[in-house]
C-alpha cells in the first residue's frame, strides 16, 4: 500500500462553527514522502500489528517461535532496538557476543542476536536490505548537544525513548546497553572509521526476527533530525508479530 502525504488545509468542525486551518492533523512529512505499510515478512497468523508513530517508543513481549516483522514505512527510518530475556532481564542483547560469534560487523539474514551469556535471543529470518547496523549506537539529548549544539537541547533522542518505554517494564538506565539500528546505514570503512550516511533502505523494506526464547523487545522510532540517519524526515514504523498457524501440517 502506498500513501502520498502532502500538506493540506484541514477543516475543523465543531457543533457551532467550522474553522479553516493550515495546521495539519498528525505528523508532518517532507513533500513527496511515500509511506508503504507493506506486510509481514513471515508466514502464519498475525497476533499483533502496531504502527509506531514518528519519534515514539514501543515495546512488546514475544513468545519463543513468534516472529517480529519491522517495516520501514517511509524509508531510511532507523528503528533503534533492544532485546531482553523476558523472564530474566539481566540477560540482554550483547553487541560483542553477537559480532564475535558470527565474525562479521553487520547483521544480515541468519544473524543470531546473542545475549551477554552467549545464548540466542532472536535470529534474523528475513532481511530486505544488504546490511543492518549494530555499531552506531543510540542518539540522546546529551550526544545531540555535544555534536550539534545546545539549540538541540529540547529534542529527545532514542535514549530518552528507551528510558520511557523501559520504565513500563521495571527497567531503568542501568539496563540500557548497546543496541541495534535496523535500517540505519553505518558503513565501516577500510581504516575502521564509521559514518552515518543516507540510507540503503526504502519505503516498505522489512526485517523479520524470530524469538528463540521468550523475549522483551524495546524499539525507539528514532527522533534524530540533525544527521541523515532518518533522511531528515521522521516517518512511522510498523511492527507485526506473527506465529505459526497451529493448523498447519509439517
Ligand atoms: Zn536515534
Image (cartoon, rainbow, N blue to C red):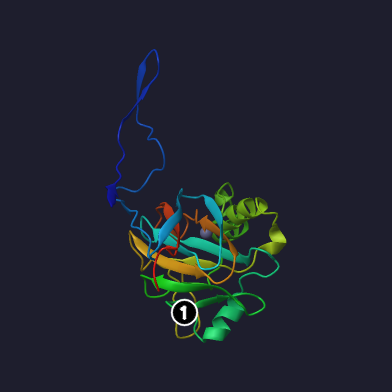
Any part of residue 184 in sight? no
Where residue 131 sits: x, y (%)?
41, 75
Residue 246 location, quadrant: bottom left
Where residue 115 sits: x, y (%)?
62, 74
- Is residue 146 toward the left or the right of residue 230 in the image? right
Q: Secondary structure at mark 1?
A: loop
User: In this view, which residue lies farthest toward the top?
Assistant: 16
Where residue 242 sits: x, y (%)?
44, 60
Where residue 57 sits: x, y (%)?
54, 52
Q: Could you say which is closer to the camera, residue 56 or residue 143?
A: 56
Residue 146 location, quadrant: bottom right
- Is residue 247 toward the left or the right of residue 121 in the image? left
Q: Could you say which is closer to the camera, residue 195 or residue 81?
A: 81
Q: Could you say which is closer to the camera, residue 228 or residue 220?
A: 220
Q: Could you say which is closer to the camera, residue 131 or residue 224?
A: 131
Work out which quarter of the rendered image holds the C terminus and state it: bottom left
Query: Where is mark 1, residue-wise?
Result: 188
Q: In the image, is the residue at mark 1 within 8 Å of ligand 1 by its beta carbon?
A: no
- The residue shown at (49%, 50%) is 55
Q: Residues within 10 Å of mark 1 (few under 14, many from 20)?
A: some
Amino acid at each position: 500500500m502506498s500513501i502520498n502525504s502532502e500538506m493540506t488545509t484541514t477543516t475543523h468542525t465543531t457543533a457551532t462553527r467550522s474553522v479553516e486551518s493550515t495546521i495539519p492533523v498528525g505528523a508532518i512529512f517532507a513533500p513527496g514522502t511515500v509511506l508503504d505499510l507493506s506486510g509481514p515478512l513471515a508466514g502464519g497468523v498475525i497476533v499483533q500489528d502496531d504502527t509506531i508513530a514518528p519519534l515514539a517508543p514501543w515495546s512488546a513481549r514475544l513468545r519463543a517461535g513468534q516472529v517480529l516483522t519491522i517495516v520501514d514505512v517511509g524509508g531510511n527510518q532507523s528503528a533503534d532496538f533492544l532485546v531482553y530475556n523476558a523472564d530474566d532481564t539481566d540477560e540482554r542483547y550483547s553487541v560483542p557476543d553477537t559480532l564475535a560469534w558470527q565474525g562479521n560487523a553487520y547483521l544480515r539474514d541468519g544473524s543470531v542476536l546473542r545475549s551477554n551469556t552467549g545464548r540466542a535471543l532472536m535470529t534474523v529470518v528475513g532481511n530486505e536490505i544488504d546490511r543492518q547496523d549494530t555499531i552506531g549506537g543510540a542518539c540522546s539529548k546529551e550526544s545531540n548537544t555535544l555534536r550539534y549544539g545546545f539549540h538541540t537541547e529540547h529534542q529527545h533522542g532514542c535514549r530518552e525513548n528507551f528510558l520511557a518505554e523501559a520504565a513500563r517494564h521495571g527497567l531503568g538506565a542501568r539496563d540500557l546497553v548497546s543496541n541495534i539500528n535496523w535500517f540505519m546505514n553505518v558503513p565501516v570503512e577500510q581504516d575502521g572509521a564509521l559514518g552515518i550516511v543516507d540510507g540503503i533502505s526504502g519505503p516498505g523494506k522489512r526485517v523479520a526476527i524470530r524469538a528463540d526464547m521468550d523475549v522483551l523487545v524495546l524499539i525507539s522510532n528514532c527522533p534524530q533530525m540533525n544527521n541523515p540517519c532518518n533522511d531528515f524526515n521522521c516517518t512511522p514504523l510498523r511492527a507485526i508479530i506473527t506465529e505459526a498457524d497451529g493448523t498447519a501440517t509439517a
